Image (cartoon, rainbow, N blue to C red):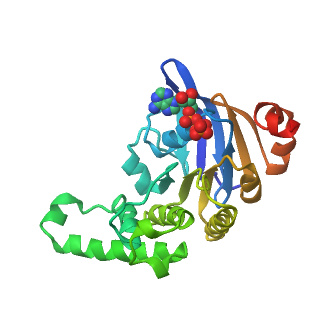
Amino acid sequence: MTEPLLQVSGLSRSFGGVYAVDDVDLTVERGSILGVIGPNGAGKSTLFNLVSGQLPAERGEIRLGGRRIDRLPPHRRARLGIAIVFQGARVFHGMSVLENAMVGAHATTGAGFAAAALRLPRHRREERLIAERAREAVRRVGLEAWADRPAELLPLGQQRALQVARALCGEPTLLLLDEPASGLRAGERDRLADLVEQLRADGLTIMLVEHDVALVGRLADRVTVLDLGKVIAEGTPDEIRTDPRVVTAYLGTEAAA
Ligand SMILES: Nc1ncnc2c1ncn2[C@@H]1O[C@H](COP(=O)(O)OP(=O)(O)OP(=O)(O)O)[C@@H](O)[C@H]1O
């Protein structure tokens, strides 16, 4: 068996003495989609922030391709291939779709401020590379016709696709999507789901936090269920749907309705 792309073990983080993520173990196989679900406050966003490095862990290990990354700052993890689309992320107003995507590539290229300020050849080469990557990312998410238009004119569903493009500019191996479908209409959700499926078909590994359980059921190969910071169930979408702990903790009110 090949090694999982992401291995999390014993991961913990508290706020004011209360554990938001409590001794969490999970694995994400290469080329798969792991859905992460759970009620409000279950610790899903905190888990993503621990994996991407926005928050330091208190305890536990995070390995990417076997390498320990839990002590690395976010930009080092980004260079190793982790990209995150934050919950409720917004596009930058006054910038084109392409320019918005380019912001993502700056996170993982390295000539630095001095080279940029002096407009050294290395910086110019890098700007060209960034523009090429951004154009390719915008094409991958189906926004090439919009590339030069102001990003704020995009409908919400396409703004989400642009956020995915921005993440793709870093050429990630692991993409973390935090509630990418929230606030979208049914048709927009379907198009976003098609995009996520396409990215997986291209070989990307994805962790998806979503409140829309039907969407997770459609997309995820496996699902991890969190409640009060702990993993309460793990399995295929079908196994999760019928797991009594999940029905009680998470789907209880819907199942009873
Ligand atoms: N920066 C913070 N400071 C203090 N408490 C926090 C912080 N971030 C998260 N928490 C707490 O940690 C717990 C888990 O929050 P988190 O946002 O990770 O849950 P979630 O599952 O993503 O919830 P939601 O579905 O509502 O987005 C909550 O009790 C929350 O209040």
On the image, the x and y values in percent for residue 4 come to 64, 51
- Name the residue rendered at 38%, 71% in the picture: 150
The quarter in which the C terminus is drawn is top right
Please tell me whether residue 188 is drawn above or below residue 56 in the rendered image.
below
Quarter of the picture containing the N terminus is bottom right
For the residue pair 127 and 93, the one nearer the viewer reads as 93
Is 149 situated left or right of 234 in this image? left
Can residue 246 be seen from the camera position used here?
Answer: yes
Between 230 and 98, the residue placed more toward the observer is: 98
Vertical position of residue 99 compared to residue 16: above or below: below
Can you give x and y, in whole percent of width and height, for residue 220 in the image? 72, 55
In the current view of this chain or complex, which residue is farthest to the bottom? 145
Ligand 1 appears in which quadrant?
top right
- Percent of width and height locating residue 221: 74, 55
Residue drawn at x 43%, y 41% is: 54
Residue at 55% from the left image edge and 76% from the top image edge: 142
Q: Quadrant for residue 56, please give it.
A: top left
Residue lying furthest left: 118
**Which of the two residues, 110 or 194, is positioned nearer the viewer here?**
194
Q: Can residue 44 be spotted in the picture?
A: no
